[in-house]
Image (cartoon, rainbow, N blue to C red):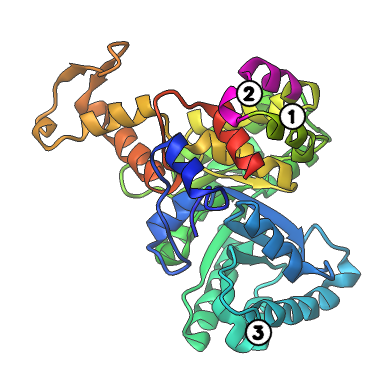
Amino acid sequence: MRHFGHIAPEVRQRIFHQEPGAFTADSPARLLSAALGATLYSPATRPRLADDIVKQAGRGVVSMVLCLEDSIDDADVAAGEENLVRQFADLDARTGLEPPLLFIRVRAPEQIPDLVRRLGPTVRLLSGFVLPKFTEERGIPFLEALAVAEAASGRRLFAMPVLESPELLYRESRVDTLEGISRAVGKYRDRVLALRLGVTDFCSSYGLRRAPDMTAYDVQIVASVIADVVNMLGRADGTGFTVTGPVWEYFRVSERMFKPQLRQSPFLQVRAVELREKLIEHAMDGLLREISLDQANGLLGKTCIHPSHVLPVHALSVVSHEEFSDAADILRPERGGGGVLRSAYTNKMNEVKPHRAWAERTLLRAEVFGVANEDVGFVELLAAGITG
């Protein structure tokens, strides 16, 4: 699979200076953690879940979470588990299918080995589990259960802990909670693919909900948690993890709204102002701002609950030609001794040693999301993804 793999090869050649690279569920963890992109959540109880997965893969989704936790009623957990087993069998029977990276969000540790056993050979389609309300005390049993299931199945299985507990939010317990989480994920580092932020639960603790014209960073109590999580768990010194952006709750926009206009003229002729006005009109501006702020604050990828969010996340994840030029210049072998140089775009200073970690992360993102051509921006990438 690859990002933007659903669009025609000739279009990819036109918009990318460096096309997104291919990867599989068996690729190295470092690459997969950067490639998650917009991780689309779906209730595990959906009766046509296998069809939904295939459909979303055809639209550019590369990672999905099939949820047995908050998205379904307590009374429906058993039915959801049974449905997952059936739907995985359905997917497995489809010849030549390469599904997205699939994860199951569970409620209790014992579900992990039980589901792996019940999935049988179809576990080959599973990339791992999402672990809710993760703290050291609650998380260790999940990680231990994952290790048992991995050994029994012979299948590499990743964990994606969700950081969403009140202990992490409250000031008096935050540092201790973060230190405990750090110990837990550090012990099982090889199995932790990424850390996910549960901002909806954070807001719930104070009866808050951000409006569609506000980002998570406008809610100061939430922004402070994000900052502390990145501070302790997202460092670029080799001890950190990929931390993904929080969910965006609003989805009044459908990409179908744009298709008639985009099909009437080549995507490169779509005026940026017109498309931007439509996005704002339909409450997407908040999402775009939040994605940009996620990246500025060290987050990569995003939890998504609606397919219309996927393309904006991926389009804004593509490395610009200017970013790529700066990163490649900083990492030239002859720059190993440090120093300062003017960027090729002659608009900024690139200081080799301080900017090295940024450059390395940028080139990793370029490997999975690609590098846009010099005259291609977000609007062209979005339009190309919508028209396919």
Q: Do the numbered discs 1 and 2 sit on residues whose CB atoms are within 8 Å? A: yes
Assess disc 3: are there few (<14), some (14-19) or many (≥20) residues with their C-alpha within 10 Å of its C-alpha. many
Could you tell me which residue is drawn at 56 percent across and 27 percent down?
268
Depth order, front residue of 366/194: 366
In the image, is residue 162 above or below residue 200?
A: below
- Sequence-wise, the earlier of marks 1 and 2 is 1
Is disc 3 placed on a helix, strand or loop? Answer: helix
- Left or right: 152 with respect to 202? left
User: Is residue 376 at least partly visible in the picture?
Assistant: yes
Residue type at tag 3? Leu
Which numbered marker is on residue 261? Answer: 1
Mark 1 or 3: the one toward you:
1
Q: CA distance from mark 1 to mark 2?
A: 9 Å
Assess disc 2: are there few (<14), some (14-19) or many (≥20) residues with their C-alpha within 10 Å of its C-alpha. some
Could you tell me which residue is drawn at 67 percent across and 84 percent down?
114
- Sequence-wise, the earlier of marks 1 and 3 is 3
Assess disc 1: are there few (<14), some (14-19) or many (≥20) residues with their C-alpha within 10 Å of its C-alpha. some
Q: Which residue is mark 2?
A: 270
Is disc 1 placed on a helix, strand or loop? Answer: helix
Magenta part of the chain:
266-278
Number of callouts in the render? 3
Residue type at tag 1? Gln
